[in-house]
Image (cartoon, rainbow, N blue to C red):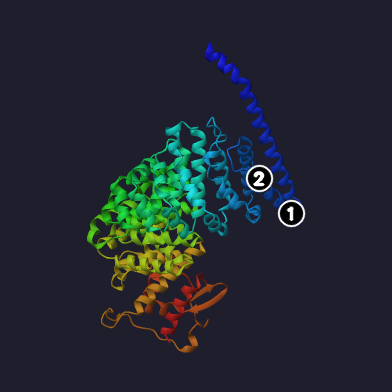
Amino acid sequence: MELKKHQDQRLPERKGQKRKLEGEIEEEQREISAVEEAAAAPYGEARKVILNEVYAQVNILNSTFSWDEAHRATAKRATHVLAELAKNEEVVNLIVEGGAVPALVKHLQVPPSSEIDHDNSKPFEHEVEKGSAFALGLLAVKPEHQQLIVDAGALSHLVSLLKRQRDVDKDGSDSRAVNSVIRRAADAITNLAHENSSIKTRVRMEGGIPPLVELLEFTDTKVQRAAAGALRTLAFKNDENKNQIVECNALPALILMLRSDAAAIHYEAVGVIGNLVHSSPSIKREVLAAGALQPVIGLLSSCCSESQREAALLLGQFAATDSDCKVHIVQRGAVQPLIEMLQSPDVQLKEMSAFALGRLAQVKKITQFQDTHNQAGIAHNGGLVPLLKLLDSRNGSLQHNAAFSLYGLADNEDNVSDFISVGGVQKLQDGEFTVQATKDCVAKTLKRLEEKIHGRVLNHLLYLMRVAEKAVQRRVALALAHLCSPDDQRAIFINNCGLDLLLGLLGSSSPKQQLDGAIALYRLANKATTLSPVDAAPPSPTPQVYLGEQYVNNATLSDVTFLVEGRRFYAHRICLLASSDAFRAMFDGGYRVRNCNCADVMVYQPFFVSLLLSELIQLR
């Protein structure tokens, strides 16, 4: 009964505090609304109103640094007004110009203990500091203000705020308020150190890394995320910070966070690890030894595309460590989700997955046997076609990563037939590549494929030319026309009907197929004429026919006419039969021109005409 009576006595007091708090919130909102209305006014007038408001809030902060309850309430409201204003980046410069930085930095710390009332009450404990940290973090978004805030002494106070986690256990402080101030302090450090190497180092010198690492195991997930975000920034391109983070035993907590169901948590954790291992082989080994590989692979299937992207990038970094790691990545199931990511609408996701697959496909001589299995596995799981499609991208980085991956896959003999049968050679030849490095990579890939057109690879391709569907047969014939050795031309194009396939393309209704066929025939003709005397076949016993100059491309007694883009070219069947295997196959084979008379007309592409004219010129 006494307890209930005591509670009843406190009820009016609580209601009064609630009304007072509601009144403060309304007043704060009125001030913010007034400034927002001023921002919509003409520039000169708006600037004056905003500066006056900033001056007013700064004066409040400078005159309320005590434990007096009214002072604390007023200071809290002032920090919130400045923070709300700072959310508008166009106003940030005015806030700094109005002198807000020193005043906010002052309120990152608590007033002197001598100011505490005799009952030891601390009104709005942690609230004013939280508002100051939040406002300073927003001001630090602009790089030009970062050093000013640090020079005002903010870092040491922010690091002290990170350590307030201990207050929860020591004196029973409001855990919610403590969590909020810690989170705002970590976020402020993140913004201050963003892309600023000297401030990253200052944070370490001020002792900021150990408490941030401790916070990775904090019960509040928002605090975990904020701490990981700060460590991620501090680790980027700063070797001393990386080493201290690892020395503080951050890896076990980070790896646990990788397995979190919360996307915000595992995204920050994989980002920290990615920055730790970048350009640091020793930390890579430590991260792998700590058990990071499987949870990182698991993130490839995350619902968060940012986490997927970071995981793919990290696997690419792991794959560069050693070939054993490559094999483990493949064995643990990374290939299939990486290939699925190649087909994502997210360009960056496609880029990182192509990067990871490219690293997995590269061969080191000392472990070549293991790496070739990775190459075969990527192709077998359907990686070739989506990688080839990425060559059409207008994004230079994405295009290059795809080309780099294809270069690795082309190194494996087991992939060559698949590469050719899906049209990979034509894709490489027809591609429009924006970066010279990509052009060089494509040229090396074609050269690598050319070097493998022999033995069992050639036998398999000849088999496909006989039994595969027509589209595949044509792709093989086209590729072989460009890649095969001159010594194998007769076996491919005469004995196995490859020439028939190329000539058949000339009669296609598709201009693209006509052009491809004509280019392939032209390439074959060039190869045949560049054979050295030692390598050349014995002269044909077929008698040569020579015409006078007046009969070249002359309608007189011509018995075959070529029509190209509306222009007629005249030739003599007997001369073509006697002097060219290509035309002999055309007229002696099963084509519709076999029994044509002088009135018959064939329509071909310019490249084929150049071949015809070269034949005619040889007859002169």
Residue identified by numbered label 1: 48
**Please, what secondary structure does the residue beneath circle 2 have?**
helix
Residue 567, visible in the rendered structure:
yes
- Image location (x, y in percent) of residue 469: 38, 54
Type of residue at label 1?
Lys
Q: Position of residue 151 (x, y in %)?
A: 53, 57
Q: Residue at x 64, y 52 (%)?
A: 95
Please state if 565 lies on the left or on the right of 445 as rendered.
right
Residue type, mark 2 in image: Ile
| Closest to the observer, 96 or 600 | 96
Of residues 520 and 2, the one nearer the viewer is 2
Q: Earlier in the sequence, mark 2 or mark 1?
A: 1
Q: Residue furthest top?
A: 1
Q: Which residue is mark 2?
A: 60
Q: Position of residue 431 (x, y in %)?
A: 46, 64
Residue lying at 44% horizontally and 42% vertically, measured from the top left: 163
Q: Quadrant of residue 42?
A: bottom right
The percent coordinates of residue 60 (x first, y second) are: 65, 45
Label 1 neighbourhood size at 10 Å, few (<14), some (14-19), many (20+)? some
Q: Are marks 2 and 1 in contact (CB under 8 Å)?
A: no
